[in-house]
Image: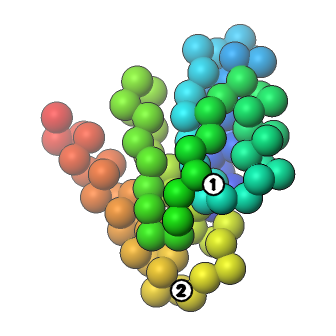
Amino acid sequence: MCCIAPVIAARVLGTAAGGRGCSVTIGSDTQTASAIQKMGASHVATNVTGAHVDEANRLVTTGAYMFHASPWDVFQGIGAMIDRFATMVAK
């Protein structure tokens, strides 16, 4: 999941909705991170080229266009997300 979409995972899997909780990234936006935490999920700050893996929920996220970054940097972050997803699936 990338950009703002990890908030959906937080809403569905967060403890506030009766889920078991999850950890996601939307990058480094503090207001959105606060909303994620209120949903009962954890936010992990990353940079634009980073991705986060929640092994327990088999969930991979990146901030992508949540950053004011170049398309190349966003591409690298999405690529990192895809690489981590492929690694997870191969296990």
Question: Which label was assigned to residue 88?
Answer: none
**Quick check: can you spot residue 1?**
no
x and y percent of residue 84 in the render? 30, 51
Q: Is residue 1 above or below residue 58?
A: below
Label 2 crowd (10 A; few <14 / some 14-19 / many >=20): few
**Quick check: can you spot residue 36?**
yes
Q: Quadrant of the C terminus?
A: top left
Provide the residue designation for mark 2: 71
Looking at the image, do the residues carrying marks 1 and 2 touch, with CB atoms under 8 Å apart?
no
Residue occupying image coordinates x 24% and y 40%: 89
Secondary structure of the residue carrying numbered label 1: loop
Q: Which kind of residue does numbered mark 1 sit on?
A: Ile
Q: Which residue is at the front of the view, 41 or 3?
A: 41
| Count of labels in the image | 2
x and y percent of residue 26 in the render? 63, 54
Q: Is residue 4 above or below residue 12?
A: below
Secondary structure of the residue carrying numbered label 2: helix
Provide the residue designation for mark 1: 26
Residue occupying image coordinates x 71% and y 24%: 40
Q: Residue furthest left?
A: 91
Label 1 crowd (10 A; few <14 / some 14-19 / many >=20): many
Mark sitting earlier along the chain (1/2): 1
Q: Which kind of residue does numbered mark 2 sit on?
A: Pro
x and y percent of residue 15 in the render? 69, 17
Image-based side of 7 in relation to 86, left or right: right
Q: Which residue is at the front of the view, 15 or 9?
A: 15
The residues tagged by marks 1 and 2 sit, at their Cα atoms, a distance apart of 16 Å
Image-based side of 72 in relation to 19, left or right: left
Q: Is residue 39 above or below residue 88?
A: above
Residue occupying image coordinates x 35% and y 63%: 80
Residue occupying image coordinates x 62% and y 33%: 42
x and y percent of residue 33 in the render? 73, 46
